[in-house]
Amino acid sequence: MSEDNQISAAITTENLGTLLTNLDANEALLPVVPDISDEALKRLLGVDQTTEFDDIAAEVMDAHPEWKPILVDLTEYAKDAKFLDDTSELETKAVAFARKITVQRRLAAHDRRRASLAIYHQVAELAGHGKIAAQPYFDRMAGFYPGRAPKTPTPPTPPTP
């Protein structure tokens, strides 16, 4: 709605294409990993804000390699640590970028929906006053808000003599 519009943004087709191409190019630079389901992803051990526990474990392996459990591959352990370090800033920037896109999209969606609701109420009023051209639009729109039926318009009171 114009009086309280939260965002006035546009993106050119060229800029959108560039963004998408760059995202694809960046994705191609990442190592290939198997895709896993959301459920399986939730079961993986998480990455805390602090990796102090892992740092202490690495210190143990540096000081006492003879204590290495049989299931631990120290080469992969070191690779995983380096990958986590190397991708930390990338993740931070990717999350910030995704949030910026989400905020912009939600603001635009909010503004558009508020304007659409105003249009819906205008159409409902016109349909209620017998404007035949408004009725098909009202019929199509009303199903989206069954609990928000517009107020039935009251006919104007004729002037008293």
Image (cartoon, rainbow, N blue to C red):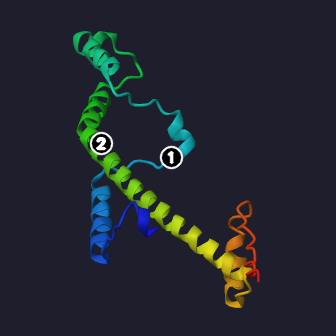
Helix, strand or loop at mark 1: loop
Instruction: Say if 24 sits above or below 85 in the image.
Output: below
Instruction: Say if 97 sits above or below 122 in the image.
Output: above
Q: Residue 138: horizontal and vertical position, in percent?
A: 69, 78
Instruction: Say if 96 sits above or below 155 in the image.
Output: above
Disc 2 target residue: 92
Residue at the image position 73 percent from the left and 81 percent from the top: 159
Number of the front mark, 1 or 2: 2
Distance between the Cα atoms at labels 1 and 2? 22 Å
**From the viewer's perspective, is 101 left or right of 133?**
left
The quadrant of the picture occupied by the C terminus is: bottom right
Which label sits on residue 36? Answer: 1
Q: Earlier in the sequence, mark 1 or mark 2?
A: 1
Q: Residue 10: horizontal and vertical position, in percent?
A: 33, 71
Q: Residue 51: horizontal and vertical position, in percent?
A: 32, 24
Residue at the image position 71 percent from the left and 71 percent from the top: 142
Residue lying farthest to the bottom in this orientation: 133
Residue at the image position 28 percent from the left and 46 percent from the top: 93
Residue in front for this viewpoint, 70 or 125: 125
Residue in front for this viewpoint, 75 or 100: 100
